[in-house]
Image (cartoon, rainbow, N blue to C red):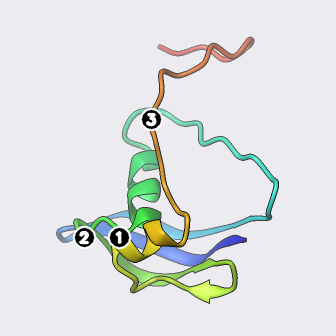
Amino acid sequence: MLELKGLSVAIEDREILHDINLTIEQGETHALFGPNGSGKTTLLMAIMGFPRYQITRGNIIFKGKDITSAPLDERARLGIGMSFQRPPVVRGVKTQ
């Protein structure tokens, strides 16, 4: 359903993500965990197609269609969206 192939993302001239590979099949749920500044938001913004997040290498495939160059509004019409929430408390996971 969603596949990232060798995705690298930059903001201005600074590469934030390098060579990300990920496959999410229909019905699967994934969670992104990591410290502040590790690229979680950058990854989501790049998948959504926000112009500030430049895909410098790789591809985003959604439902078999390459959407790497598709604008944000087209991606939204395809059903891609994001929202933020208050992080859940996960037993055994500590924040500093």
What residue is disc 1 on? 72
Disc 3 to disc 1, C-alpha distance: 17 Å
Q: Which numbered disc flags the more N-terminal residue, 3 or 1?
A: 1
Residues at discs 2 and 3 in contact (Cβ within 8 Å): no
**Residue 24 found in image quarter:** bottom right
Secondary structure of the residue carrying numbered label 3: loop
Residue 17 appears in the figure: no
Residues at discs 1 and 2 in contact (Cβ within 8 Å): yes
Disc 1 to disc 2, C-alpha distance: 8 Å
Q: Which numbered disc flags the more N-terminal residue, 2 or 3?
A: 2
Q: Position of residue 82 (x, y in %)?
A: 47, 49
Q: Amino acid at mark 1?
A: Leu
Residue at the spot 17% in from the left edge and 68% down from the top edge: 12
Q: Nearer the viewer, residue 70 or 56?
A: 70
Q: Which numbered disc flags the more N-terminal residue, 1 or 2?
A: 2
What residue is disc 2 on? 51
Which one is closest to the eye, mark 1 or mark 2?
A: 1
Q: Amino acid at mark 3?
A: Phe
Asked whether, in this view, residue 63 is left or right of residue 70, the answer is right
Q: Amino acid at mark 2?
A: Pro
- In the displayed structure, 64 sits above or below 84; it is below
What residue is disc 3 on? 84
- For the N terminus, the quadrant is bottom right
Residue at the spot 53% in from the left edge and 22% down from the top edge: 87
**Residue 9 found in image quarter:** bottom left
Secondary structure of the residue carrying numbered label 2: loop
Q: Position of residue 85 (x, y in %)?
A: 48, 28
